[in-house]
Image (spheres, rainbow, N blue to C red):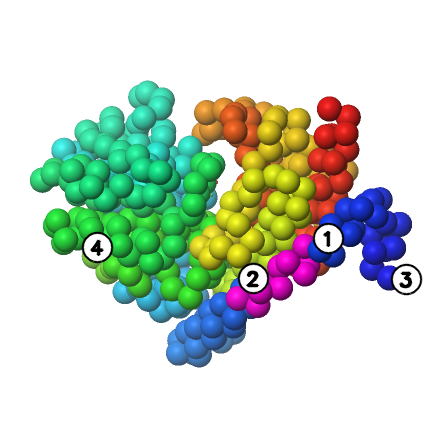
Amino acid sequence: MNTKDFYINNFGISASSCDLGEKAMEMSRDAFMQAEKTAEFNQMKVLKAFMNNNISEQHFMTTTGYGYDDLGRDTLDKVYAEVFGAEAALVRQTIVNGTHAIASCLFGVLRPGDTLVAVTGRPYDTLEEVIGIRGENNGSLKEFGVKYKEVPLKDNKPDYEGIRAAIDDSVKAVAIQRSRGYAWRESFSVDEIGKIIKCVKDIRSDIICIVDNCYGEFVEEREPTQVGADLIVGSLIKNPGGGLAKTGGYIAGTKKCIEQVSYRVTCPGIGAECGATLGENRYMYQGFFMAPHIVCQAVKAAIYCGCIFSLMGFDIMPGVDEKRTDIIQAVKFENKENLVAFCQGIQSGSPIDSFVVPMPWDMPGYENEVIMAAGAFVQGSSIEISADGPIREPFVSYYQGGLTFESAKVAILKAADKVIGERNDG
Ligand SMILES: *Cc1c(COP(=O)(O)O)cnc(C)c1O
């Protein structure tokens, strides 16, 4: 049976969507080659770090209780630091998600009276309560006397003049977000982030530059720590967990900043010295080892998704041949119905919970209703196939992940079918 018949007979995908899929494969060829080259380079970096740190069976042993002298934990910190070109790192399953990792950085380095400046516009939705833009009496930075300023993007680009104007003597740290999050804007390349950091450090070199690196790891050959970031932060159920880490987050950066942050991740005096790993080390290592390849699968899925929906006439970001710096493909639908249809289609082509129909809901930490498609082995994992979007204008869905490109293709074709159906009905 040829593949097209297989798609049609087994997944109920229409012949016309299959043809669209074939066209998309053609269109994607150059972008795929680029993604594979990046993966090869990054895989070598990771492999070399494993060799340099003599990783062996003993690193997979478990600790309980305090977790003193957990060799696997301490060495994984070194492996991450080496791969990301940083002096030090903290990789912990006790970091519950990306928001927690970022919050730990902010609370770790900022003190009452200091100012934090978000230099790439409004940060990711879940950080609003951490900073204190939203919510009250919740222990936010604001409640602890940390001031906050924001430099909006200008034509969706960093506003360098605005950044220079915002930085006064009280500024202790700036926050930079690499990925678009839930905003219809370009994600910022490592080069661009380097420019932002230089702009900040030219004013005062001791300003701490913190980069929300979520979704960015291994999409380029360098990470923001290699262009001057003092701290980079991410989630292990996104790129660097490689689909195998069951939970956790990482923070990498300068020795001094990492030490300060370690007192927040645990508490003053304890820092990085405690934390039982409960047998998870093997997955964290293996996931990091797999990550360059898995990220490549996700990037290919994003490219393919972008092609299909642009062929269908929707606005996409980034464009098919634009340089990528994260695993996200944004697709702009003209209404709520198409956005919901897209997410439901993705869900129906996922390996897990394919029978579930996602609906918009009020998710904790988010201001608008959000619809989320997630067909993952690890709950909420978005290096696995997933799509989400807040139910607000301009009705953009953010597609990401796919442990294997081949399976992601099915989900994307099903989503295309579902949107075509919705368009015809509506
Ligand atoms: C995922 C993400 C976060 C953190 O989200 P969690 O769900 O808490 O892991 C922060 N910033 C960006 C840009 C993200 O994509």
Mark 1 lies on residue: 21
Q: Which secondary structure, mark 1?
A: helix
The structure residue drawn at horizontal position 26% and vertical position 50%, both measured from the top left corner, is 196
In the image, residue 386 lies in the stretch drawn in magenta: no
In depth, the one of 173 and 263 nearer the eye is 173
Quadrant containing the N terminus in the rendered view: bottom right
The structure residue drawn at horizontal position 55% and vertical position 46%, both measured from the top left corner, is 329
Amino acid type assigned to the residue bearing label 2 in the image:
Ala
Q: Name the quadrant where ligand 1 sits.
A: top left
| Residue, far left | 169
* Mark 1 vs 4, N-terminal side: 1
**CA–CA distance in space, label 1 to label 4:** 43 Å
Mark 4 lies on residue: 198
Mark 3 lies on residue: 1
Q: Nearer the viewer, mark 3 or mark 2?
A: 2
Amino acid type assigned to the residue bearing label 1 in the image:
Gly
- Drawn side of residue 293 relative to residue 52, left or right: right
